[in-house]
Image (tube, rainbow, N blue to C red):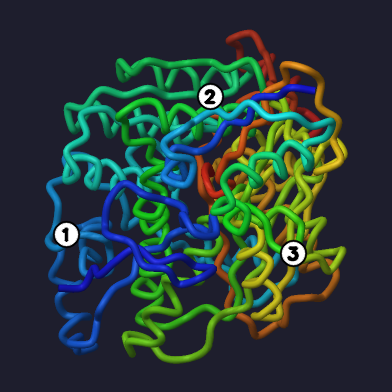
Amino acid sequence: MAVDSLTCKECEASYELGAAYFCERCFGPLEVRYDHSDLEPAAARRKIQAGSQGIWRYANFLPFDGRPGDPLEPGLTPLIRADRLAERLGLGEVWVKNDAANPTHSFKDRVVAVAVAKAKELGFDTVACASTGNLANAVAAHAAAAGLDSYVFVPSDLEEQKLLATAIYGTKLVGVRGNYDDVNRLCTELAQERPWAFVNVNLRPYYAEGSKTLAYETIEQLGWELPDRIVAPIASGSMFTKLGRGISEWLQLGLVSGELPTFCGAQADGCSPVATAFADGSSVCKPQKPDTIAKSLAIGDPADGPYALDLARSTGGSIDSVSDDEITAGIKLLAETTGIFTETAGGVTVGVLAKLAERGAIGGDERVVVYITGEGLKTLDAARDSFRMHEIDPTLEDFEREFAAQAVV
Amino acid sequence: MSVKVKIPSQLRAATNGEGELEVEGGTVGEALDAVFDQHDGLRERITQDGDLRRFVNVYVSGEDIRFQDGLETAVADGDEVTILPAVAGG
């Protein structure tokens, strides 16, 4: 048996594997611990390769005794070598992990698949979440697929696309008049009052484990090798730190060899508590009131901020932020060079990649993996004024007139 | 000032099951001290070296005290002080 206990990341107090998320002694976050003492690396790799075409191929490294049933299995999204993007930025080897290619078009399908499976195992009949949008889509969809009731809490001023792509699944969509941190506080209080599985509150230790599958897939897709550098977005810092955890686990267990990559985090200027703390040399994040077009990253009080800072610092990395204009430019650059249309969070990540390249932080021989966590069609406003359409009459003459300046020689 | 302090359900074993405590105090820090005077077991869970532990959030009527004056934040008669774990969300 691999999954062992819940353990406090701060004081090491141990808890049973139930719906608990913080340490009653010190308020520290609980994390799932495993016992892999009988694991044999070659056999583990073979088992993975013979597994399902999604995250459950990594079931041995997720908090379950067996592989749960999952009608909407996410994962095994494309890892694409992005040579034209690398060339535009003067870099050597850049790969893009396109995690928009999931059932509800963001990496949140991974964490929600794990949380919903755990909610069912623990006997909950209702799941819920506090969301900036992508999580809302995923919880509503996976609850529908699993036959569970759901409540989804979001800031009421969210992008229409994200509201629509949540409500369509028949969830109870609750728009809270406030920012994400207000929604999160409300859900933390509600989790004490209602017998529900809040995927990112009382089931958060399990939910967060789902992000490790992004790291596992990257390693497998690179032919059981590691990248030199990772560039990934930071909202709460959970996905960022779990990328590190996933890689560390496999390094320790011998499924891959090498060193932990350099971790570079990406935030928007308008919500940059972790980047600010990094620049200030601080180990805690001062909360901010978000004001950015990157709403999926607009968490002013990031729960895993201290751990994201630790990871960036201990690997010689960095945490940077970019402006709204740089976010839009990042979306366009990725689309033009890779054919991938990402949402604002992806624009933040590509914007930070460009910033790192510009200041010479990335060596020419480095293998860099960039994490694109969401779909461009969900944040259309960010790209609204980014193009001009050639409107013509349906005649050859009008076409020739319109494109006269670009006539083929 | 008489304020109401709300205790997370997971810590109510230390308050004999009480979820809301009425205490006197002019600031958040004073109100929390008054709570700790009644239930000493809570002090070391919530604070460390006189400050809040780093994964504890405190709100006065819904507003995070880090946007105000921290433990020095003034409280008015009837205000609600809520203690919550910080490790949710995202």
> Of circles 2 and 3, which is in front?
3
Residue at numbered disc 1:
A52
Q: Are marks 1 and 2 on the same chain?
A: yes
Q: Chain of mark 2?
A: A
Report, in whole angstroms, how far the alpha carbon at label 1 lies from the one at label 2: 33 Å
**Label 3 sits on what residue type?**
Asp
Q: Residues within 10 Å of mark 2 (few under 14, many from 20)?
A: many
Q: Position of residue A72 (x, y in %)?
A: 22, 40
* Along the line of sight, the residue nearer the viewer: A284 or A370: A284
Identify residue type, mark 2. Answer: Val
Tell me if label 2 and label 3 are in contact, CB under 8 Å. no
> Residue visible at 16% across and 45% down?
A121
Q: Which mark is residue A154?
A: 2
Mark 1 is surrounded, within 10 Å at the Cα level, by few (under 14), some (14 to 19) or many (20 or more) other residues, namely some
Q: Label 3: how many residues lie within 10 Å, few (<14), some (14-19) or many (20+)?
A: few
Quarter that holds the C terminus of chain A: top right
Q: Is residue A360 visible?
A: yes
